[in-house]
Amino acid sequence: MAALLLIVRLAGERVAFPAADVEAVVEIDYVVPAPGAPAHVAGLAALRSRVLTVIDCPAALGLASGETPRRDAVVAVVDGHPYALLVEAVEDVIEAESEPVPLPMRTAPLWRRAAKGMVPAEGELLLLVDVAALIAGQVSEAA
């Protein structure tokens, strides 16, 4: 069986998260700021009696967050802690056509730091996003 992918819109691009890294897809209604947190941490939110650290994915990529508040989020658990990764939109769950392939040399630096590779699905090559890199802030720190 091929790997499942969650397709989302992030920074204007259609990208894939490994479905195995995703616990849920939710809408975040209210984010409480977390003073002193890194710039890519939007704050904290409550979900089913749990506190989630909310990651502003565009900020983690080194981009401006934008005027429109994002509500769609991908919930992932890394090192036992739940995170909500804000994305522009959640599209679908699909099957990868094969294993990921390396990134092309001409890939933009922000994606080179945030992607594990490219994965063929539905007749196109999609960036396979490294969830842990977005959460850790490695993307924005390297920018």
Image (tube, rainbow, N blue to C red):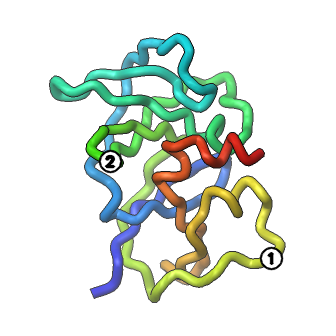
Q: Where's residue 122, x and y in %?
A: 49, 79
Instruction: Please report the residue visible at 74 percent of the width from the left and 78 percent of the height from the top.
Output: 104
Furthest residue in direction right, as rendered: 106
Residue 105: assigned label: 1
Using the rendered view, name the quadrant where residue 51 is placed.
Answer: top left
Q: Earlier in the sequence, mark 1 or mark 2?
A: 2
Residue 32: assigned label: none
Give the residue type at disc 2: Asp
Indicate left or right for 98 with 112 as reference: left
Q: Where's residue 102, x and y in %?
A: 64, 81
Instruction: Please report the residue visible at 68 percent of the width from the left and 41 percent of the height from the top.
Output: 140
Element under disc 1: loop
Which residue position is annotated with label 2?
79
Dot in front, 1 or 2:
2
Q: Where's residue 21, x and y in %?
A: 34, 58
Mark 2 crowdedness (10 Å alpha carbons): few <14, some 14-19, many ≥20: few
* Quadrant housing the C terminus: top right
Instruction: Please report the residue visible at 37 percent of the width from the left and 77 percent of the height from the top.
Output: 95
* Quadrant housing the N terminus: bottom left
In the image, residue 86 above or below residue 8 = above
